[in-house]
Amino acid sequence: MEKLTDKLFTVKYNEDTGKPHIEIVDQNVCFKKNLVSFGNCIECGACSIGCPFDNIACRSPRGGYGVRYQHG
């Protein structure tokens, strides 16, 4: 049986540094310094669901960018 990490390393991601698809909507809502990183995002939406302030906008990346699943 393969390890979960072995399967995760088969996911390829083409990062769009020019236009992030995950953003903090209102910086004033977040009291502490927040960092939202979209590098290696698997586009599951957990960041926007897990934000207690509903302050993260998560969109689909533009064409040619984002996650690419090779084996499934």
Image (cartoon, rainbow, N blue to C red):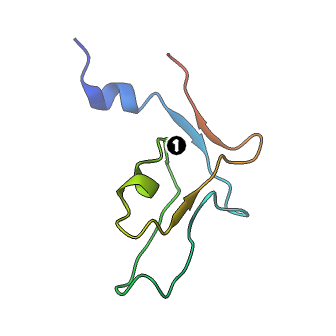
Determine which quarter of the picture holds residue 63: top right
Q: Horizontal placement of 47 versus 4: left or right?
A: right
Q: Horizontal placement of 36 versus 16: left or right?
A: left
Residue 71 place in picture, x, y as percent: 50, 16
Residue 26 place in picture, x, y as percent: 55, 80
**Secondary structure of residue under mark 1:** loop
Taking the spot 45% from the left edge, 65% from the top edge, the residue there is 54
Taking the spot 36% from the left edge, 87% from the top edge, the residue there is 31
Amino acid at dot 1: Glu
Q: Residues within 10 Å of mark 1 (few under 14, many from 20)?
A: some
Residue 29 place in picture, x, y as percent: 45, 83
Taking the spot 52% from the left edge, 43% from the top edge, the residue there is 43
Q: Is residue 22 shown above or below 71?
A: below
Residue 45 place in picture, x, y as percent: 47, 47
Q: Which residue is labeled 1 in the image?
A: 43
User: In this figure, what is the number of numbered marks?
Assistant: 1
Q: Horizontal placement of 46 versus 38: left or right?
A: left
The front one of 28 and 10 is 28
Taking the spot 41% from the left edge, 32% from the top edge, the residue there is 9
Furthest toward the front, the residue is 53
Determine which quarter of the picture holds residue 18: bottom right
Q: Is residue 57 shown above or below 41?
A: below
Of the 4 image quadrants, the one containing the N terminus is top left
Determine which quarter of the picture holds residue 65: top right
Furthest toward the right, the residue is 63
Q: Is residue 3 shown above or below 5?
A: above
